[in-house]
Image (cartoon, rainbow, N blue to C red):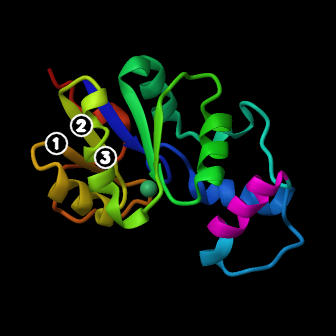
């Protein structure tokens, strides 16, 4: 089976990562929160923002690290937007885990993007994300895949999907 795992706020503590970059790398810059992704992506492309191998592993949630270690050959990371930044984050955070990843260039079409890649991975498939927009997109494009909403922020969740707070709560699907 294959577990498709969203990156930001599903396996990766994005808020802590943002604070870390602001504190240690780009502290002199000021811009709106909504602009971070694009600006930092441009810095990665330009070579002015870099992460050492393993440097960002500290931002993997502990349960995510355990889960990925336990199911290494069955996990696929899925993310989108700012591809250079996302690639840099994944490669530094997951240096010690050989996990394939997929980066969708178009944020609004997570489901359609994922559908085009599913056949490369062993069924059955299961998908986990914190974003209700992404979950709705995947639900409409890949109707028969079990979807799980993960909440790292303590909120209740949308109520549309089974909700988990820890990847260890995922079932084994055979
Ligand atoms: Mg996310």
Viewer-nearest of labels 3 and 2? 3
How crowded pointer 1 is (Cα within 10 Å; few <14, some 14-19, many 20+) is rated as some
Viewer-nearest of labels 1 and 3? 3
> Residue extending furthest front?
116
Give the quarter of the figure containing the C terminus.
top left
Marks 1,3: beta carbons within 8 A: no
Q: Residue 143 or 132: which is nearer the viewer? A: 143
Q: Is residue 110 above or below residue 32?
A: above
Residue numbers of the magenta segment: 37-47
State the CA–CA distance, disc 1 to disc 2. Answer: 5 Å
* Disc 2: which residue: 126
Ligand 1 sits in which quadrant? bottom left
**Residue at the image position 42 percent from the left and 27 percent from the top:** 67
Give the quarter of the figure containing the N terminus.
top left
Q: Residue 111 or 56: which is nearer the viewer? A: 111
Sequence-wise first label, 1 or 3? 3
**Residue at the image position 69 percent from the left and 40 percent from the top:** 56
Q: Residue 75 or 60: which is nearer the viewer? A: 75
Disc 1 element: loop
How crowded pointer 3 is (Cα within 10 Å; few <14, some 14-19, many 20+) is rated as many
Mark 2 CB within 8 Å of ligand 1? no
Percent position of residue 115, x then y: 25, 45
How crowded pointer 2 is (Cα within 10 Å; few <14, some 14-19, many 20+) is rated as many
Percent position of residue 134, x then y: 32, 60
* Disc 3: which residue: 114
Q: Is residue 57 visible?
A: no
* Disc 1: which residue: 146
State the CA–CA distance, disc 3 to disc 2. Answer: 12 Å
């Amino acid at each position: 089976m294959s577990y498709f795992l969203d990156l930001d706020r599903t396996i990766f503590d994005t808020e802590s990562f943002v604070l870390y970059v602001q504190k240690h790398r780009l502290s002199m810059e000021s811009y709106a929160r909504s602009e971070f992704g694009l600006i930092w992506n441009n810095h990665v492309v330009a070579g002015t923002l870099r992460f050492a191998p393993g440097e960002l592993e500290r931002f993997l949630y502990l349960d995510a690290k355990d889960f990925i270690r336990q199911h290494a050959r069955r996990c696929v990371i899925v993310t989108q937007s700012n591809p250079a930044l996302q690639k840099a984050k994944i490669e530094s955070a997951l240096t010690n885990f050989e996990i394939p990843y997929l980066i969708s260039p178009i944020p609004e079409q997570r489901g359609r993007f994922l559908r085009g890649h599913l056949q490369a991975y062993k069924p059955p498939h299961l998908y986990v994300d914190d974003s209700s927009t992404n979950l709705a997109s995947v639900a409409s494009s890949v109707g028969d895949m079990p979807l799980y909403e993960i909440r790292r922020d303590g909120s209740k969740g949308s109520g549309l999907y089974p909700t988990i707070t820890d990847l260890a709560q995922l079932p084994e699907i055979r």
